[in-house]
Amino acid sequence: MDELPIQNRFRLRPLTQLRPHQCKWPVSEDRAEVGHFLFCCRPVAGTSPYCTHHHQMAIALPAKNTYRRPRLARR
């Protein structure tokens, strides 16, 4: 998952403690409880559920030519 700089890690919270204006991007797993994630909590960007950084990650397009269709064998 996405790693945050150490100075921002204190802001991570579980989903149940997030407010509507906080980023809902999961950034790490809460090691205290299996299957629970901690979320970014930075201010959201406009109407997105994510902060500016995570919004850009969510809408990013793959780089051109990152996938090439396998060639068919000729007979």
Image: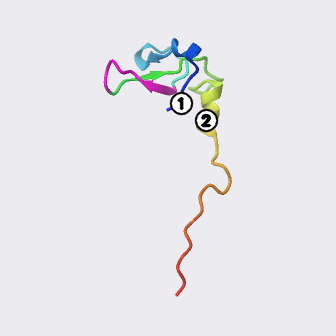
Number of residue marks: 2
- Residue for point 64% across, 41% down: 60
**Residue 73 visible somewhere in the drawing:** yes
Location of residue 38 (image quadrant) = top left
Q: Where residue 64 sits in the image (x, y, percent)?
A: 68, 54
Q: Give the SS element for disc 2.
A: helix
Q: Where residue 25 sits in the image (x, y, percent)?
A: 52, 27
Location of residue 28 (image quadrant) = top left
Q: Where residue 42 sits in the image (x, y, percent)?
A: 58, 17
Q: Is 65 included in the stretch rendered in magenta?
A: no
Q: Give the SS element for disc 1.
A: loop
Q: What residue span does the magenta drawing correspond to?
A: 25-34
Q: Is residue 67 left or right of residue 31?
A: right
Q: How crowded is the residue under tag 2: few (<14 C-alpha within 10 Å), some, or many (20+)? A: few
Q: Tell me which label, 1 or 2, sits earlier in the chain.
A: 1
Question: Is most of the magenta stretch helix, strand or loop?
Answer: loop
Q: Amino acid at mark 2?
A: Met
User: Label 2 near label 1: C-beta < 8 Å?
Assistant: yes
Q: Amino acid at mark 1?
A: Asp
- Residue for point 55% across, 68% down: 70
Task: Give the residue pinned by disc 2.
Answer: 57
The one nearer the camera, 67 or 22, is 67
Q: Is residue 58 left or right of residue 27?
A: right
Location of residue 50 (image quadrant) = top right
Q: Is 31 included in the stretch rendered in magenta?
A: yes
Task: Give the residue pinned by disc 1.
Answer: 2
